[in-house]
Image (cartoon, rainbow, N blue to C red):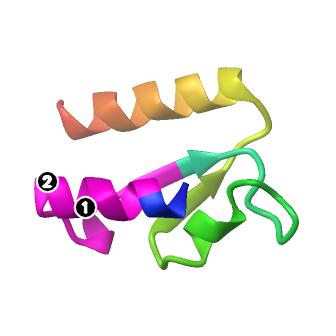
């Protein structure tokens, strides 16, 4: 996942501060942990329902 994030940053010419990663396994043994180590802002969620709500809330706030 971290590799994919770096590819997205490169393709879209983004900086770390431009991104937020939402994941359910940001703990040390989790499959999202390597993204956390990139320095990108991360938000821990419990499940995909919480991810969906969080992303909708962020988009609604951003595009008011």
Horizontal and vertical percent position of residue 25: 78, 52
The Cα atoms of the two marked residues, 2 and 1, are separated by 5 Å
The one nearer the camera, 26 or 55, is 26
The vertical placement of 40 against 32, above or below, is: below
Residue at (60, 55) in percent of width and height = 43
Horizontal and vertical percent position of residue 20: 42, 55
Residue at (79, 38) in percent of width and height = 46
Q: Is 50 on the left-hand or right-hand side of 25?
A: left
The vertical placement of 32 against 39, above or below, is: above
| Magenta-drawn stretch, dominant element (helix, strand or loop) | helix
Horizontal and vertical percent position of residue 13: 11, 63
Q: Which residues are magenta?
A: 4-21
Question: Circles 2 and 1: CB distance less than 8 Å?
Answer: yes
The vertical placement of 37 against 20, above or below, is: below
Q: Is 36 on the left-hand or right-hand side of 40?
A: right
- Mark identifier at residue 1: none
Which quadrant does the N terminus fall into?
bottom right
Residue at (30, 71) in percent of width and height = 17
- Mark identifier at residue 12: 2
Q: Is residue 15 magenta?
A: yes
The crowd level at tag 2 (other Cα within 10 Å; few <14, some 14-19, many 20+) is few
Please tell me whether mark 2 sits on a helix, a strand or a loop. Answer: helix
Q: Is residue 55 magenta?
A: no
- Mark identifier at residue 9: 1
Which quadrant does the C terminus fall into?
top left
Q: Is 23 on the left-hand or right-hand side of 41?
A: right
Residue at (68, 25) in percent of width and height = 48
Q: Quadrant of residue 45?
A: top right
Please tell me whether mark 1 sits on a helix, a strand or a loop. Answer: helix
């Amino acid at each position: 996942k971290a590799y994919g994030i770096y590819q997205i940053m490169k393709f879209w010419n983004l900086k770390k501060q431009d991104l937020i990663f939402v994941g359910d396994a940001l703990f040390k043994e989790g499959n999202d942990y390597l993204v956390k180590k990139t320095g990108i802002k991360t938000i821990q969620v419990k499940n995909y329902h919480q991810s969906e709500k969080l992303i909708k809330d962020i988009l609604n706030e951003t595009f008011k």
